[in-house]
């Protein structure tokens, strides 16, 4: 899977704005969570897939719940983001429902200390959708025809440019880039903790 990690592409794209800084400063964390997702290693049956979706559902529900807190409404509008359009917990519920599984409990996520932290979290959540189609193909290759709306993002449109635009706008207006990086790092840590498989915790 090494060829899929974003670490290899750190310097792609030239000018070093906030999106490029985030990519560079979280590349190692990306490699770690990608290794933890480990579809070929962990998804061998439908039950394994349900477990993975359940873990992701808990994380997305908790994190997205903080992203849509009304305290950030004005700040999202200020950077041109319609935050509801970036929430994907509903896609996880739909896939789990189709698989006949109940939706997992939400992870407990503390409120973001500043809007910069929330923006860093959005960067990670929307970035994680970028590799989703690859993951969907891996899942289908491993266990056949199962619902993969969450991973494939079918029908959702490409939301990544809006996030990059928001990061640039925030930085141009003197926003705190360090807070955004801290929020992204903290979100990767939440995913890493939530994706560790029971066997790895022993
Ligand atoms: C097997 C699992 C995963 C695979 C195969 C994968 C693959 C990829 C790929 C190929 C890209 C680059 C897409 C592009 O430049 O167009 C990407 C970007 C990204 N992924 Fe993943 N990913 C995985 C899991 C995750 C997870 C679990 C997270 C976070 C929770 C994550 C966060 C990100 C972020 C933030 C970016 C954007 C990097 C940037 O350009 O700034 N990924 N991923």
Image: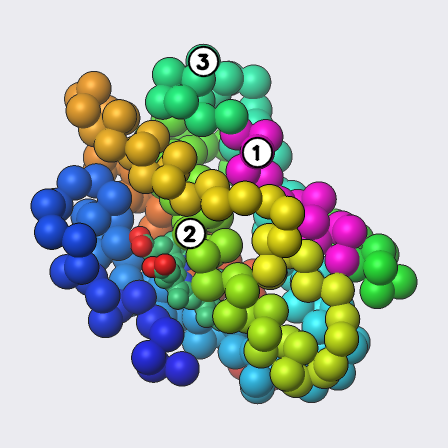
Secondary element under disc 3, as helix, strand or loop, is: helix
Compare marks 2 and 1 and give the one earlier in the sequence. Answer: 1
Compare marks 2 and 3 and give the one earlier in the sequence. Answer: 3
Secondary element under disc 2, as helix, strand or loop, is: helix
Residue placed farthest to the top in the image?
74
The quarter of the image holding the C terminus is: bottom right
**Disc 1 crowd, CA 10 A, few/some/many (<14, 14-19, 20+):** few
| Residue 157 image label | none
Find residue 152 and report its image quarter.
bottom right
Residue wearing tag 3: 74
Q: Are the two marked residues, 2 and 3, in contact with CB atoms closer than 8 angstroms?
A: no
Q: Which residues are magenta?
A: 83-95
Q: Are the two marked residues, 2 and 1, in contact with CB atoms closer than 8 angstroms?
A: no
Q: Are the two marked residues, 1 and 3, in contact with CB atoms closer than 8 angstroms?
A: no
**Disc 2 crowd, CA 10 A, few/some/many (<14, 14-19, 20+):** some
Find residue 7 and report its image quarter.
bottom left
Residue sitting at 51 percent across and 70 percent down?
134
Q: Is residue 3 visible?
A: yes
Label 2, label 3: how far apart the Cα atoms are: 23 Å
Q: Is residue 124 left or right of residue 58?
A: left
Is residue 144 depicted above or below 37 in this figure? below
| Residue 85 image label | 1
Between 192 and 93, the one nearer to me in the picture: 93
| Residue 127 image label | 2
Indicate the position of residue 61 as horizontal and vertical percent values. Answer: 65, 44
Q: Is residue 189 left or right of residue 106?
A: left
Q: Is residue 90 magenta?
A: yes
Residue sitting at 28 percent across and 62 percent down?
27
Label 2, label 1: how far apart the Cα atoms are: 14 Å
Indicate the position of residue 112 as horizontal and vertical percent values. Answer: 45, 32
């Amino acid at each position: 899977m090494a060829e899929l990690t974003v670490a290899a592409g750190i310097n792609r794209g030239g000018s070093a704005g906030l999106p490029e800084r985030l990519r560079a400063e979280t590349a190692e964390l990306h490699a770690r969570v990608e290794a933890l997702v480990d579809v070929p290693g962990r998804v061998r049956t439908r039950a394994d897939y349900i477990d993975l979706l359940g873990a992701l559902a808990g994380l997305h529900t908790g994190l997205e719940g903080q992203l849509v807190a009304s305290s950030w409404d004005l700040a999202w509008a200020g950077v041109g983001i319609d935050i509801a359009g970036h929430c994907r917990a509903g896609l996880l519920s739909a896939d789990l429902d189709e698989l006949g599984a109940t939706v997992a409990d939400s992870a407990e996520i503390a409120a973001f200390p500043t809007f910069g932290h929330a923006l860093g979290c959005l960067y990670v959540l929307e970035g994680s959708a970028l590799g989703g189609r690859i993951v969907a193909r891996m899942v289908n290759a491993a266990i056949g025809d199962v619902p993969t709306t969450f991973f494939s993002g079918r029908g959702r449109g490409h939301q990544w440019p809006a996030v990059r635009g928001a990061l640039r706008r925030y930085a141009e207006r003197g926003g705190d880039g360090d807070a955004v990086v801290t929020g992204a790092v903290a979100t990767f840590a939440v995913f890493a903790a939530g994706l560790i498989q029971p066997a790895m915790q022993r």
